[in-house]
Image (cartoon, rainbow, N blue to C red):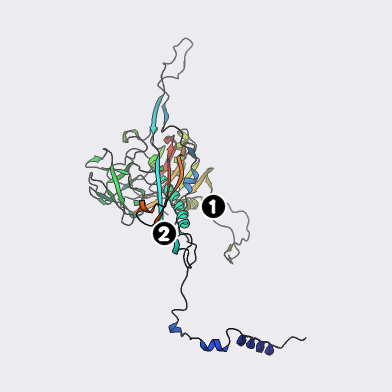
Amino acid sequence: MANPSLSEYLAQSQRGLYQSVFGPEYLMKQTYHTVDGASQIFNTTYGRKVWQALNNQTRFFNAVPRVVWGNTAGWRVRTDRGSSRSRPVTETGSLPTVDISNIATVSSLPRIVSTTFGASVKSVFTAQLEGGIGDVLAMENENSQLDHIKEINEELLAGSAFIVSAGGTTAFTVPASVAHHFKIGDAVSMNNVGTGFDRTGGSAVSAVDTGTGVVTIANGTAFADGDIAAIFSRAGFTSLDDIVAEDAMVVGGGSGGAEVRAYDLTYSDRVAGTWNAAASVQLNSGTGRALSLTHLDTAIQKIRENGGEPKLILLGHDQYFNLERLLNSNQRYMGQEEYQVGVGSERTFPGTRTGLVLATYQGIPILPDADVPKSVASNDAVLGSNIYVLDTDYLEIAVAQPTQYVENRDYFAANALVVRGLLYTMGEMRCKNIWVQAKIGDLNAS
């Protein structure tokens, strides 16, 4: 049988349309909507997937070795060989005087980080309906796990001392973008030229406004513009910036120096050039400066002079690209080739590979992390991120209790029809040799 012509095919299709449930009688019964009256024929619906508009990277946390806490809360550090215990001896000369090593002790109890979430019984049901997000408890649980690890990473990289722009006896103000480095429960000490340090135990932080930069504290010595707020003790994990610090370092060009404590070390323990201060703290009195290779080389040199071997360069993404630009002039281009890459369904124009992708400097791995703290200039402007050169052989996250999950469905205890969840982790970051860590601060962002 010959194929029907186009006109016959269209005629057959038209007859099929009228014979269907959408035939002429159906069409005649419908109410037609004009453009202006179409508000009820379409409702916006959303997919169940909840996308993240947050940076959940936790690179430093992943880079530090994790160990079991063990059965002790402290560790010992040998800081002196003993005087005159080793010397030349002549043929009939006397032996060196017997002496003992100087052993210092450091201790820190486990710290607890917790994250809570919950959902009402009604929201659990309605989230399953059309247009809902599905299992709301599973969604909150999954995101809380990300938030929990992110909080630990932020605590490990919390800044330890900042210049304040204003304050009083119950609050002080720092740039809003660095306020999150102070955590509720931390104790803060203050230094200014007039009254000196508040060394009586610090003033407890009760609230932090990351929108305005106002940090609320208990009654104490009044803060004023140009003073320095430094960490006296942490409620959470001891941060890397607490560890890599030294006594009276000038932060932000403030009036006086910062006295940052770590573990159970007192302010008088952290004298520059001694075992429990950083191997090298390179600041510039609150004046921004460009990163140079000399800064990195000096940090590496100091660590090696103190018996360590750098194994990690930790920096922010801004300093990563500053370093890339510094080293780009050393790149050698061999030959010429055309190179093309895909971006979605598009492709670039044919061209050459350009730009230097950094993995190491002098064989030391480079790790950028968005949570690395930034310096603050003497005019209260936020500068670029710090750079840390670390011997990670002496850094560890000691885990007393791995992350635990607790769920509560006791409506009477909550006095509400809600389901609540809790994640908590108990541990601490320990540094067995502060002497072989280094920091570079007061760097420009570009």
Q: Which mark is residue 357?
A: 1
Residues at marks 2 and 1, CA–CA distance in whole angstroms: 51 Å
Does residue 11 appear in the picture of this structure?
A: yes
Q: On the image, which quarter does residue 82 sit in? A: top left
Disc 1 is placed on an element classified as: loop
Task: Tell me if label 2 and label 1 are in contact, CB under 8 Å.
Answer: no
The quadrant in which the N terminus is found is bottom right
In the picture of the structure, the residue carrying the numbered disc 2 is 121
Residue drawn at (46%, 74%), measured in percent from left and top?
43
Q: Is residue 30 left or right of residue 285?
A: right
Q: Position of residue 146 (x, y in %)?
A: 46, 52
Q: Decide: few, some or many residues near mark 2? Use Cα within 10 Å; few <14, some 14-19, many ≥20.
A: some
Most foreground residue, 49 or 16: 16
Residue drawn at (42%, 30%), measured in percent from left and top?
77
Identify the amino acid type marked 1: Val
Most foreground residue, 396 or 255: 396
Does residue 178 appear in the picture of this structure?
A: no
Identify the amino acid type marked 2: Val
Upstream in sequence: badge 2 or badge 1? 2
Q: Is residue 166 left or right of residue 55?
A: left
Is 99 drawn above or below residue 27 in the view shown? above
Most foreground residue, 164 or 221: 221
Q: Position of residue 17 (x, y in %)?
A: 61, 85
Q: Position of residue 150 (x, y in %)?
A: 44, 50
The quadrant in which the C terminus is found is bottom left
Q: Position of residue 30 (x, y in %)?
A: 50, 86
